Image: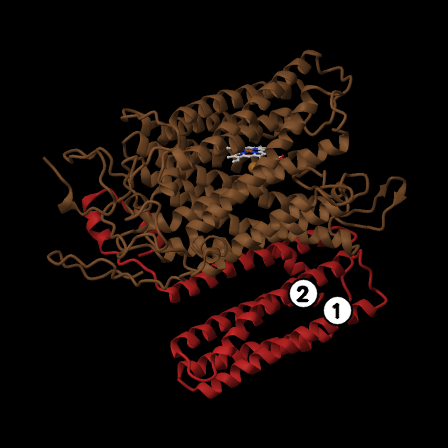
Amino acid sequence: MAYVAHDASVFAPPAEVGEMELYHPKTWLGKYVWSQDAKVIGIQYAITAIGIGLVALVMSWLIRLQLGFPDSFSFIDPSNYLQFVTLHGMIMVVYLLTALFLGGFGNYLIPLMVGSRDMVFPYVNMVSYWVYLFAVLLLVASFFVPGGPTGAGWTLYPPQAILQGTPGATWGIILMLVSLVFFIIGFTMGGLNYVVTVLQARTRGMTLMRMPLTIWGIFMATVLALLAFPALLVSAIMMLFDLLLGTSFFMPALVSMGQQSEHAGGSPLLFQHLFWFFGHPEVYIVALPAFGIVSDLLSVHARKNIFGYRMMVWAIVAIGGLSFVVWAHHMYVSGMNPYFGFFFATTTLIIAVPTALKVYNWVLTLWHGNIQLTVPMLFAIGFIFAFIHGGLTGLFLGNVTVSVPLSDTMFVVAHFHLVMAVAPIMVVFGAIYHWYPKITGRMLNEGMGKFHFWATFLGTYAIYLPMHYLGFLGVPRRYYAVGGTDFIPASAQSLNAGITIASLLVGAVQLVFLYNLVWSYFKGKPSGGNPWNATTLEWQTADTPPKHGNFGATLPVVYRWAYDYSVPGADQDFIPQNVPAREVART
Amino acid sequence: MSMFQQLMAKPWAADQGKLDDLYAGGASSRLAKKLALRVFLAVVTVLFTLLVTAYGGRMVYEDWRPAPQVNLLWANTLVLILSSAALQWAQYSVRRGQMDAMRVGLLAGGAFTVVFLFGQVLAWRQLAMMVYFDVTNPAIAFFYLITGVHGVHLLGGLVAWGRTVAKVWGDFEVAKVRQSVELCTVYWHFLLLVWLVLFGLLFTGNNLDLLLKLCGIR
Ligand code: HEM
Ligand SMILES: [Cu+2]
């Protein structure tokens, strides 16, 4: 990180930056399978994540079928139901969203956007993907072992997670835990790469505060993940010990199915603390990249600089720090010292401040912007809606007195789906529509895209808004059937049926999106290098899609921040980051 | 520039632009390796902090039964200190261009590490033979878990050490070897420090109060 002496008369020649040695594969396999090119690895991550995500999507249909039309499907018994719920949650949070945002978008975008030829450790980066794939395969394998996958809920709370009687209590949970261990190892390899590349391999002129917010979001999320995943790693290993070696870290002495267990003296609460010490940062691991990406989508498609760039960066950093001191708001009903509860309720409300700031800044970016209602923009706006709704219910849940009665009801399900499922997925879609032209050289079809947006946006609202109401009524989550419960009116059932229909429709609409991905790859409109007239470096590459090494002969030199849109006096409404002041056309 | 100053910069302002244009960029893989090791050590620190906290948290329960002492651990600790010292010697030598001394230091460091790991396994077996041994006693389970995790990190270090050793024969690029030795040394010192903390706080039996105070539990 050196600063060269400044001599205004001589412009420093480009690519004084030390060039890195690139690995040049000779075979097709070396180029596309055992690839060390971060772009290819990013795409591998993305395809794997979306593939396993589709499995989780199918499971959500099965869950909804049972809830909407109980007693109609003989192939869903109570055990299956719990297994679907568990795997749906775990896959969506960890194997889809975390892997897609950091492994997928992180790999593709970090080197391109900071002006680097590749990640700093390409080999480690490649291994990271293969370890991730192995973790996914272990997870898939758990469907085929005796007893099937675990049904312990995505939170995997012991003691029930490893007690006989819980679905998948032996093989299912073993594979789940081992898979998580591998996921974390693989992620750590990738994560070291992302962090070091951002800090150490930026091109000339790319200071930290000139980085696009996409990179800030992915960077901070990676830091969080590196520091939070060890908690999950430790708890997974300790639970494996309890299960396989008979230790009692988490397992208290108890009588299970009429038998005195051999465990004694373990603390289930210890697991909950470890899990949520990971679990709450995890929600921001998913949210921060979405925050970053959506900021860039809004700015590009509203042709305006992002409102309050510095504040946005600070908010990302602040949220990152605070997210490590709020975890116990997930444990209000686990029993705790009231002062503890007070502390965590307070920190939870404090973290809402930087979060709210970001929301204001997004809205203010749109204010008086030259808004282009492109498909990425639609999804970005959809994100703002979903995130505000989910964030507001989070504020309610952050207060102990409100959270306790609502805990484990459909209200919580509605909260976290809006805030961490719908909102980030909106960004994922927006980002794919936005960067697909760079990845393939072709635009995604706009008609199909708009249909996809409206159906998904309205559909998800049809699913989650009524769910809040079910929560108020006291409908519990993770129940196969509520049976004849007096406090739940019969009409709740018709609401549930409606939600199920909406969710099946939303699911079906995703097929249009997949079709669009394939169709446009062959038939889409050629995009050129910079279809959105964006300023960031990935749009200024010599080739589209960018070749191995990203930038052709010389690395770009950066002369400005990422948000020079509609600059007064300039001819064009955007100035790319690598254009020096003297080359800006003015009339 | 400090991180804080960087975060205060206004990247859109013309004056700041002139400063920012001076940033030369960085793509040196040497700095990258150093930074990567530091970040990794931060991750490992979190891992061990969580383990120690979990141990402390469990300890306050009334039914806590301390694990029996294994005196062999004192010897093992000494051996680990020696391995760290040997690597320090290797680093000192490579910096002064004394390659033979560097080789000796490097090999001795690895050998002591292997002895340490062997000693740990022996300690495991000793504990397992004792009458007090009971897997459901958390103190004992934590002992196996924590020493195991620490040992795995040393094993990982031995891989890096092996790759360094493979480099130091015949013709080699001094700068590269020097960095590898330096990185190994940092890692070993770090794991020694971790061990001393673990050993001192958890496995010598008489520091429970201190640990609880550190964790803010008592
Ligand atoms: C201002 C922002 C937020 C606040 C105040 C907040 C607060 C809470 C609280 C108190 C709970 C526990 C509810 C209960 O069990 O009774 C909860 C659950 C949850 N939240 Fe949030 N939250 C916020 C933002 C987020 C974000 C950004 C995400 C994800 C991106 C998220 C994901 C979740 C998840 C997944 C759960 C459920 C976990 C489970 O029990 O399985 N939240 N939230
Ligand atoms: Cu939380």
What residue is shown at x 62% (from left), y 40% (from top)? A90
Query: Could you tell me if residue A158 is visible in this image?
Result: yes
Instruction: Quickly name the residue at label 2.
Output: B147
Res B53 → quadrant: bottom right
Q: Residues within 10 Å of mark 2 (few under 14, many from 20)?
A: some
Q: Quadrant of the N terminus of chain A?
A: bottom left
Amino acid found under the numbered disc labelled 1:
Trp
- Quick check: A252 left or right of A476? right
Q: Residues within 10 Å of mark 1 (few under 14, many from 20)?
A: some
- The reply to whether dot 1 and dot 2 touch (C-beta < 8 Å) is yes
Q: CA distance from mark 1 to mark 2?
A: 9 Å
Chain letter of the red region: B
Which subunit holds the residue at mark 1? B
Res A310 → quadrant: top left
- Quick check: A552 left or right of A41? left
Instruction: Quickly name the residue at label 1.
Output: B124
Which subunit holds the residue at mark 2? B
Query: Could you tell me if residue A323 is visible in this image?
Result: no
- Residue A232: percent from left, percent from top: 62, 49
- Quick check: A511 left or right of A180? left
Res A81 → quadrant: top right
- Quick check: A537 left or right of A71? left
Amino acid found under the numbered disc labelled 2:
Thr
- Residue B142: percent from left, percent from top: 71, 59
- Residue A412: percent from left, percent from top: 61, 28
In the rendered image, the vertical position of residue B180 relative to residue A249, given as above or below: below
